[in-house]
Image (cartoon, grey):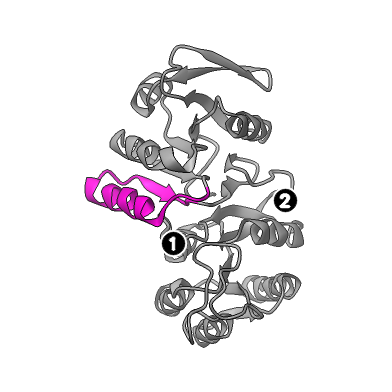
Amino acid sequence: MAVFLNEDSRIIVQGMTGAEGRKHTARMLAAGSQVVGGVTPGKGGQTVEIAGRSLPVFDSVAEAMASTGADTTVVFVPPRFAKGAVLEAVDAAIGLVVVITEGIPVHDTASFWAHAVASGNRTRIVGPNCPGVISPGKSNAGIIPADITGPGRIGLVSKSGTLTYQLMYELRDIGFSTAVGIGGDPVVGTTHIDALSAFEADPQTDLIVMIGEIGGDAEERAAVFVKEYVTKPVVGYVAGFTAPEGKTMGHAGAIVSGSSGTAAAKKEALEAAGVAVGRTPSETAELARLSLAQFVS
């Protein structure tokens, strides 16, 4: 099975007519995703030829959903327009919004996340500043390379795009049910805990790999959740053991302040919850192999 995204997902791309939107729409199509159209205000009624497909363009998400039956949107919209694009998607009550855009002001993200919660329409937001969601062999919504691995029994949730790709490659012989890149901004729509809960409920996910990084307390909160609610083995990796205090590392949310948010503190909290934590991606992959072998034996 898969979580959040499957072979029946019908995807539209907000910003499909832009350079990044076109490029990654082609890659999603090549991965077998059902991309059914795009949204660019003012260009409704046009069609765009991408990867041998003629895709319709709509002025709004609501129009695209009504015409195509779309249930997922991937947002490739510049930061200053991203808030409006996500609010529009939420108001249209689409099921899944994957926000790839980097550099969205935290206030804007907090605003559209709060609007989604208040709307009550159960729209799930993944991101922003994330690589997206992929269920190998089924569908790909975002920028994760689809040829790294195939379908399998591991569920992956990660703050980091590049570490997502590396762990998928390291464990490519086992394969993945779904990989969810949640993004590394201070405010994100889908958390480690959301993904952990989904993988725990998925009967075809046997093991969960969780990738965190310095900054904030998301990993500590995830550790509490794992200890109380997750019965499947969880293997973790926390990036940033050598990060200097007070310096942002890669992501807007990856910053250590005093004794808060360090990789060592997160590792300690996760291990106290029974999570095996590697100090490198390769060590994490080996821990995953050992944990999976013990779990299925």
Q: Position of residue 283 (x, y in %)?
A: 74, 75
Secondary structure of the residue carrying numbered label 1: loop
Secondary structure of the residue carrying numbered label 2: loop
Q: Position of residue 176 (x, y in %)?
A: 64, 55
Range of the magenta residues? 102-128
Q: Eyeballing the image, is 241 above or below 54?
A: below
Query: Given contact means CB atoms under 8 Å apart, are the residues at marks 1 and 2 in contact?
Result: no
Cα separation between marks 1 and 2: 23 Å
Residue bearing mark 1: 191
Which mark lies nearer to you, 1 or 2? 1
- Residue 36 - label: none
Residue located 58% across and 54% down the image: 179
Residue located 55% across and 24% down the image: 17
Residue located 57% across and 73% down the image: 247
Q: Give whichever of 280, 249 is nearer the camera.
A: 249
Residue bearing mark 2: 149
Mark 2 neighbour class, 10 Å CA radius: few under 14, some 14 to 19, many 20 or more: many
Q: Position of residue 199 (x, y in %)?
A: 50, 60
In magenta stretch: residue 46? no
**Counting residues from the N terminus, which is met first, the one under dot 1 or under dot 2?**
2
* Displayed quadrant of residue 69: top left
